[in-house]
Structure formats: C-alpha cells, structure tokens
Amino acid sequence: MTLILGIESSCDETAAALVTSDRRILAHRLAMQDTVHRPYGGVVPELAARAHVEVLTPLIEAAFAEAGVVLADIDAIAATAGPGLIGGVMVGLVTAKALCHAAGKPLIAVNHLEGHALSPRLADPTLAYPYLLLLVSGGHCQLLRVIGVGRYLRLATTIDDAAGEAFDKTSKILGLGFPGGPAVERAALNGDAKAVSLPRPLKGSPEPHFSFAGLKSAVLRAHQSGLYRADDIAASFQAAVVDCLIDRTKRALDVCDDVTALVVAGGVAANTVVRSALEGLATSRGLRFIAPPLWLCTDNAAMIGWAGVERYGAGMVDGLDVIARPRWPLDPDAEKARGAGVKA
Ligand code: KG4
Ligand code: ZN
C-alpha cells in the first residue's frame, strides 16, 4: 500500500489530503476563499496566491494530525503543477518541493485536469480504462478518451468560454452571487426553462467542439430587455448548457465505440440537472454512468493525491526542478481548436 500527500492550490481552493492506494482518504482539509473574492465577483489571482500562502502549511499539518501519520510515513508528495493561476500553483508546488527536499521523498507534479479526470476511479474501483470523460469546470470544457494514466485523446474542447465560466458570468449578469454555478442552479429551481429562447451554439455542428460565448451574450440581452425574471433566465440558460453538453457528448460517443462508461468530472459535474441528463444519455447507449460524489467534483486535494497514487504506481515521479505551468494540455498532440481557447 502506498500513502500520498496531495496538495491543491491552482484556483481559489487550498487543500491537502492523505490518500492511500487502496482508495482510503485518511484526511482531507480544504479552505475556500469565497469571502476574499466575493467583493470582486470573481477570483483575483494575486489575492488567491496570498491566501494560499497563509493557509496551506496549517492545512497540511491538520491533515497529518487527522490521519495520525507523519511526513516520514508517506511515500511521495503529489502537488498540482498546472494548469491554473500561476501564483497559486507556485505556492503549492514550492511547498511540496520543500517538504520533499526536507524529508527525502519523491515529488509528483500533477496536472490538475488529470486530477479531475482520474477522480472517478478514486470513487469507483470498478471503473476501468478506457472511458469517455466529459470534463466540465471553470476553466475547461473537454471531451477526452481516457486511455490510461497520462494517456488522453482530446476529442473536443471549447472554442471560447468554459461551461463553468458561462455559469459564473450568467450569475454575475443576473446578480445571483458568487460562486456562480451553484447560485444559477438554485435560481433555476424556481424558474421556467422554456421562458426565454436562448441559442445552443454549435449544436448539431459537424465540428466536435463546444462554444458558450454566444449563449452568455444572449443571457445579457435577455436580462437587459427587462422582459424576464432572473429565475426564468437562469433556468433557460441551464437548459441550453445541458442541451449543448448532451449534443456534443453524443457526437463523441459516436466515434468512441470501445468505451464502457460515460464519466463526468469537474466543478460543473456537481450540477444535478447536468448529471441526470448525462445519466439518461449513458443509459440510452447501454453505458455505465459514473460521476464522483459532489465534493469530489469541485477542486479538492483528494483527487490530486489519487492522481499521485496512480502516477506513483506507474513509476512516474518528477525532479525538484519541475516547473509550474499556467497552461498544460492533457493531450499535447490535440489540434488547436479555432478560437481563443482556454487554459489548455
Ligand atoms: O473544477 P472546479 O472546482 O475549478 C476549476 O478547475 O475550474 O470548477 C469550478 C466551476 C465554477 O465555474 C463553478 O461555477 C462551477 O464549477 N460549478 C457549477 C456548480 N458547482 C460548481 N456549475 C454549475 N452548477 C453547479 N452546481
Ligand atoms: Zn478544477
């Protein structure tokens, strides 16, 4: 059995976890920064980095205390090395390097997206490779064929905004608060999804990718028209996102006939309407549907620790000279999608 310390600090959550190769999470400590960023309606990178510095070491100490282990007991330290807000990534990675150096432990530099991509395997021991993954977070919206540790085929990505970003911007436009995704989901519960006619960008397109910028602009126009209730716009927006996600996922399943499971991960996978629509699609295709528990969908350190377990098991460790990367695609050979793209 191996024991890994996982560290996450790539956005606005600081987290430390102790995870074993037999899928036990001995401890997980997480600090949110919502109160730091709420006055600005979005994450301010420099404030995020400073907040990580303040809380990371106490969180790691608390995780060790909770698990009843010490630094000497662990096999390696896995830290997010990108992609993400570079100041925050550096805080976690440098902390991990210092601990590795002091304790003589190997470092595992984890791609944050690989953390999300493999998290369903932490939750479900029966999930085998390959599977089709819809990775939907604040910075990413991708469909990936997950072949094995470190082996990904990117089938689609967003050509503009990520799905979570669209949720966050919609929340800001409608004045629903921060963080945006859960706020929009709550408002949508009281709204009529058919009240506002909104576009489904790229739905039915032969191009495999996602696009959400046009939807966001349509939300802004609907709001400015003064004709609709915020709850109705939220519900209509959420329905449009779900339609786009399902349409694009169907297309990916058409070209991915050897997978036995449809898997969703990333912050937007915490949305219950998104989850149930994907579950329906999987069932209609005779596939298993796997979604990690809600707390494992949004950023956390258990998924980084688990990616560390998988990489350590495959002999993939890194030198202390490994660098923090603001951008880091899971599939480096993927063709560049048209449009500005996001972090990967
Ligand atoms: O994976 P994550 O925690 O951080 C990134 O790596 O980006 O994802 C955060 C994103 C945010 O955009 C947030 O609004 C969205 O996930 N999100 C949701 C929900 N919970 C979080 N979006 C829709 N519905 C939710 N319930
Ligand atoms: Zn994430």
Image (cartoon, grey):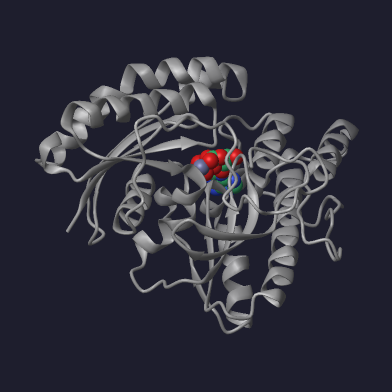
Name the image quarter holding residue 15. Answer: top left
* Percent coordinates x, y for residue 126 in the rendering: 36, 74
Q: Position of residue 80 (x, y in %)?
A: 42, 37
Image quarter of the C terminus: top right
Q: Farthest residue to the bottom: give it.
A: 286
User: In percent of the image, x 48 and y 43: which residue is there?
Assistant: 112
Residue 177 in picture, x, y percent from top left: 60, 30
Q: Is residue 183 visible?
A: no
Q: Would you place residue 84 above or below residue 46 in this image?
A: below
Left or right: 131 with respect to 311?
right
- Which residue is at 82% across, 52% downward? 195
Residue plotted at (42% across, 61% down): 120
Residue 92: x, y in percent? 38, 28
In front: 55, or 235?
A: 55
- Above or below, comparing residue 278 to residue 328 in the picture: below
Which one is nearer the viewer's eye here, 184 or 69? 69
